[in-house]
């Protein structure tokens, strides 16, 4: 972003995923276990990954509602992992001075 650009102008040049991260979205991964439609005793797995908001996960919930409404394989379980990729920088105090020649 050039120093004379406003954040709104800079957002037009950034990818939509980056803009979402600045708005608080984090990378969410869901491992979805579902039953095979023709063989209910067998479990299959599906991996879903998208930017979403913790703790309510509106994107994941929309996807799961779509799944229940449109797909034949009934859900068994969902395991969720979430990480905000843009967060405050970590600052660690280092005790010592290292000189390089």
Image (cartoon, rainbow, N blue to C red):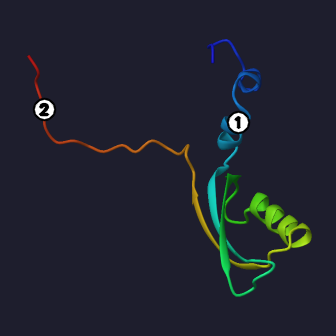
Q: Measured along the vertical axis of the image, is residue 5 above or below residue 14?
A: above
Residue at x 66% of width, y 40% of height: 22
Q: Measured along the vertical axis of the image, is residue 93 above or below residue 6?
A: below
The quadrant of the rendering that contains the N terminus is top right
Residue at x 67% of width, y 48% of height: 24
The quadrant of the rendering that contains the C terminus is top left
Q: Earlier in the sequence, mark 1 or mark 2?
A: 1
Mark 1 — residue? 19
Residue 68 in the figure: left or right of residue 5: right
SS assignment at label 1:
helix
Residue at x 76% of width, y 21% of height: 9
Q: Measured along the vertical axis of the image, is residue 70 above or below residue 25?
A: below
Q: Nearer the viewer, residue 64 or 7?
A: 64
Q: Nearer the viewer, residue 36 or 66?
A: 36
CB within 8 Å, label 1 to label 2: no
Q: Quadrant of residue 89?
A: top left
Mark 2 — residue? 97
Q: Quadrant of residue 41?
A: bottom right
Q: Position of residue 96 (x, y in %)?
A: 13, 37
SS assignment at label 2:
loop
Q: Nearer the viewer, residue 28 or 53?
A: 28
Q: How far is disc 1 from disc 2 in space, using C-alphas? A: 39 Å
Residue 46 in the figure: left or right of residue 71: left
Q: Position of residue 86 (x, y in %)?
A: 56, 43
Q: Position of residue 53 (x, y in %)?
A: 70, 56
Q: Quadrant of residue 63?
A: bottom right
Furthest residue in direction right, as rendered:
69
Q: Position of residue 33 (x, y in %)?
A: 67, 74
């Amino acid at each position: 972003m050039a120093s004379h650009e406003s954040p709104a102008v800079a957002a037009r040049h950034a990818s939509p995923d980056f803009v979402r991260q600045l708005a608080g979205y984090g990378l969410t991964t869901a491992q979805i276990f579902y039953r095979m439609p023709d063989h209910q005793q067998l479990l299959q797995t599906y991996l879903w990954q998208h930017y979403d908001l913790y703790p309510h996960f509106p994107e994941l919930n929309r996807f799961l509602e779509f799944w229940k409404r449109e797909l034949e394989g009934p859900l068994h379980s969902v395991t969720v992992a979430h990480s905000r990729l843009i967060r405050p920088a970590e600052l660690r105090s280092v005790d010592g001075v290292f000189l390089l020649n």
